[in-house]
Amino acid sequence: MADNAEHAANAEVVTRRRFLSRISLGLSALAGAVVSVPILAYLLSPLLQPGAEQWRDVGLVENFQIGDTVQVAYEDPSPLPWAGQTARTAVWLRRDSETEFNAYSINCTHLGCPVNWIQDAELFLCPCHGGVYNADGTVAGGPPPHPLSNVPVRITDDQRVQVLPVTLAQTMSQS
Ligand code: FES
């Protein structure tokens, strides 16, 4: 009789523990969803609703030397209201001839860190995990899965260089 009562008490404890465990798991899943949904929506929104093209002026053609690769900064065309200084972004721009420019995203295609141009080696290096890119943006080594994104460049009638920004989400989503 005493055994039956003890057994029933143990079963009740196990059932209560299982119930509390499930409640805990459910609340954890709910908290995870609450945190991750806005982040995913932010990351995917440029893909779902691409903004209008907004060329960014980066200076006069004559300001760039043929053969030089320089970092040019501009305001993010669609910054978050609280972005502050982070709304300022950049691309790597190279003048290849009198009339030809090429530009590359500053964001590594591995996890998005800003890459550096090393003039002597003629390579882009990513400081985060050692990603290496050739001068044309192709992957030379390390974890990056894709070349650096090419950034469209145009020269206006009044001889100004403009770039069409590539968002971090676009860089990370290339296939
Ligand atoms: S973010 Fe560039 S190698 Fe990882």
Image: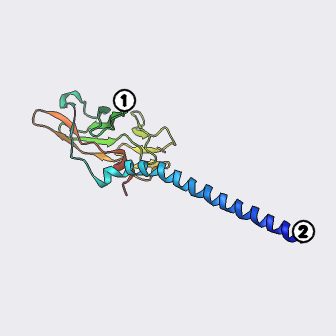
Residue receiving disc 2: 2
Q: Would you identify the image quadrant in which residue 124 lies?
A: top left
Tell me the mark number nearer the camera, choosing from 1 and 2. Answer: 2
Q: In the rendered image of this protein, does residue 162 appear above or below residue 37?
A: above
Secondary element at image label 1? helix
Amino acid type at image mark 1: Gln
Q: Residues within 10 Å of mark 2 (few under 14, many from 20)?
A: few
Toward the viewer: 120 or 107?
107
Which quarter of the rendering shows the C terminus?
bottom left
Of callouts 1 and 2, the N-terminal one? 2
Q: Nearer the viewer, residue 5 or 68?
A: 5
- From the image, which quarter does the N terminus lie in? bottom right
The residue at 18%/29% (across/down) is 60
- Relative vertical location of residue 115 with respect to residue 150 in this rendering, above or below: above
Q: Left or right: 126 with respect to 78?
A: right
Residue depicted at 36% across the width and 52% down the height:
44
Q: Which mark is residue 85?
A: 1
Specify whether 125 is left or right of 8: left
Q: Position of residue 173 (x, y in %)?
A: 38, 53
Badge 2 element: helix
Q: Is residue 147 visible?
A: no
Q: Residue furthest top?
A: 63
Q: How is the image coloured?
A: rainbow
Does residue 87 appear anywhere in the picture? yes
Q: Amino acid at mark 2?
A: Ala
Q: Residue at x 34, y 47 (%)?
A: 149
